[in-house]
Amino acid sequence: MGKVKVGSAWPLGSSVTLDGVNFSIAAPHATNVELLIFQNEDDKHAKETISLGQGNRSGDYWHVEIEGLTEGTLYGYKLSIDGHKAAEEHIVLDPCARAITGWSNYIRNQKDKVNKSFGNCLKGVVTKRDYFDFKSHPRPKHPWNQTIIYELHVGGFTKSTDSSISESKRGTFIGLIEKIPYLKSLGITAIELLPVFAFDSNDAPEGLVNYWGYSPINWFTPHQGFVDSSNPLEARKQFKQFVEVCHDNKLEVIIDVVYNHTTEGNQNGPSISWKNFGPKTYYHQDEKENYQDVSGCGNSIAANRPLVRKLILESLLCWAIELGVDGFRFDLGIALSRGENLIPLDHPPLFEEIEADPKLSGLKLISEPWDCGGLYKLGDFPAKEFRTWNGHFRDDVRRFWKGEKGTIWPLKDRLTGNKSLYNHNLANIFSINFITSHDGFTLKDLVSFNKKHNLANGENNRDGENNNNSYNYGVEGPTTNKKINNLRQKQQRNLLSTLLLTPGVPMILMGDEVGRSQGGNNNTWCQDNPLGWMNWNHENWDHELKEFVLKLISLRKQLPEFFSPDSIFDCQKDNTKVKTSHFWIQWHGIKVNKPDWGDWSHTLGFSINKNDEGSAIWLGFNAYKESMLFDLPTPISTWKKYIDTSILKTKNISKKPLANQSNVRVESNSLVLMVSSEYSKKINL
């Protein structure tokens, strides 16, 4: 080791300099800081210990530069906070470390059982901070009005032995690269990855693992479990390689980021990183220093505080500029809008800083608008550029197709862009619409189970959502009853059609396109097994459903004037007003221009008309138990039927103009899409 110099507070974390490595951490309450250098990941003793004095302090930051060190150097810290020295044999992980080692020997700390050996602690690894090569692999930059999102789990997507991927690559970023042709073939434009931050798989009850990854141990490092190597420096390289291939195939990469809590839990949880730098800084606590929790995971990050905001912003820039991601989905994002004592802020400083940063401008920003403390802000989400997951769309569409009463009026709003939920005219483009997500039933299970079946999770079926708006149609789970199976197949098509043929930005869950089931488990957070994996056994695929999804996506793309999120239609033709477009929407029931808005109604139709020329498209919804004959409005040119969910084989739908142009029969629990010949010329299926 060479000369020890004062170093610089910037940049945070460890960074390679011309002479060696600079180290910097934020620890405003520290009274003593020691930097420990290690030779190997399982070393029980430090190779070098460097004590930092007041000369190494600039405000809240402690820093030092050491000559002769290089990329790959292993390190950790020991601190005293407010005069209280940390456990003698405990080292602290740098929260800004861009690589981590020690996973093979890592033992999760407990409050009363702290690791007694450095050999069982995680250590930071010095890495270079090369920027992503955007010149060679430019961002696809799909506009929101052309975006279709596919949510998947990096590990689970390729873990199956049927995935045709070599064993070492299964469940890794490199393995996922081999499935990009499949993802591209679906017609989606963006992949949304469940958490890829380094997380603690041991943050789970005994005998289980934390599979989903909502247990961050660090906000800068790709999860080592997704890497086809034990070398910690390979994590960044392989993730960047994955993003490069996605960009080359015009697929955007959005990552699910967990900034609302960490794996350290409450006062009874382990001390790994943030706690040792000062829990008063990073976490919300009450006057008695008890952890305040609106995440459901034991703690809540105090994102209103400057040092914490800085750390989050640095993390976003790391993933966006160094690793190349195209957007972020904020888990329980509204929790980050809470100020002291968890009071919601009208103008959260974190969101203002994110939106003001030029390096993050143009990226896709998505958030869950709710947290576990009851805060729910959808249309009034306190940030201008954030899109929000629309749970109302999910619930109202499920309830309508399930056949519940009082669902027609909410459905009307969901079909036309959720204007009652958002306080501006661009409701469509701010709403992330979805029917299913990782959190809940898969699409197939949604129409196969009345209740959740989560016993495998070890909590006596107490975990997971109870209000699923699901229905099994006569038999709980799989059945050989052909009538029930046909109805379930229709309902899957109904739900997907409603998702993809209405405004809003659609999101599809991994495997829904082929009928993937989780056996009725609606909370597979701990199921790193076939229950939570993508099914690659083609014999078990619903191939007709997959073809149907491809058709829906293609129709959506080829008819953007009707299904684009930025399409805004007047509710009626009105020549006395300045209209937003030459298209206008007309509502129908089984009779033209006579919608039935009653609580008892289960049928609805609407057409999008072009000026005085006639109807361009017509959609009919029948959630009733019997077929209904719908009168059709006058089209611009002859009607052609493109979607009929009662016909389970896609190829059986004729592309010829209908002989009967005055009405159409919509079977029970079915949806029909009609397109006038003028616009069907644009369609190539």
Image (cartoon, helix red, strand yellow):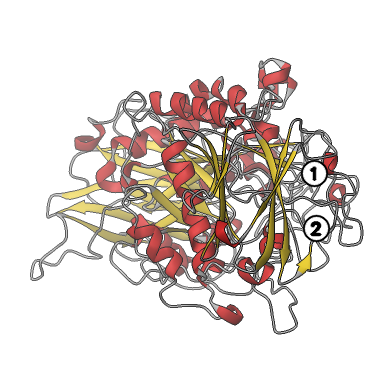
Question: Mark 1: which secondary structure?
Answer: loop
Using the image as rendered, state which of residue 293 and residue 133 is in the foreground: 133
User: Which residue is located at x 34 percent, y 28 percent?
Assistant: 655
Q: Please state, as top left, top right, bottom left or bottom right, where the C terminus lies in the image.
A: top left
Using the image as rendered, state which of residue 206 and residue 379 is in the foreground: 206
Q: Which mark is residue 121?
A: 1
Look at the image and tell me whether residue 390 can be seen: yes
Q: Position of residue 403 (x, y in %)?
A: 59, 60
State the residue lying farthest toward the bottom.
287
User: Which residue is located at x 66 percent, y 49 percent?
Assistant: 446
Using the image as rendered, state which of residue 453 and residue 231 is in the foreground: 231
Q: Please state, as top left, top right, bottom left or bottom right, where the N terminus lies in the image.
A: top right
Residue type indicated by callout 2? Pro
Distance CA(mark 1)–CA(mark 2): 12 Å
From this view, report whether residue 637 is shown above or below residue 624.
above
From this view, report whether residue 407 is shown above or below residue 218.
below
Residue type indicated by callout 1? Cys
From this view, report whether residue 512 is shown above or below residue 618.
above
Q: Badge 1, how many Cα within 10 Å: few under 14, some, many 20+?
A: many
State the residue lying farthest toward the front.
3
| Residue 347 placement: quadrant | bottom left
| Residue 482 placement: quadrant | top right
Q: Which mark is residue 270?
A: 2
Using the image as rendered, state which of residue 52 and residue 254 is in the foreground: 52
Query: In the visual, does 96 lie left or right of 299?
Result: left
State the residue lying farthest toward the left.
576
Q: Position of residue 434 (x, y in %)?
A: 51, 51
Labels 1 and 2: the sequence-earlier one: 1
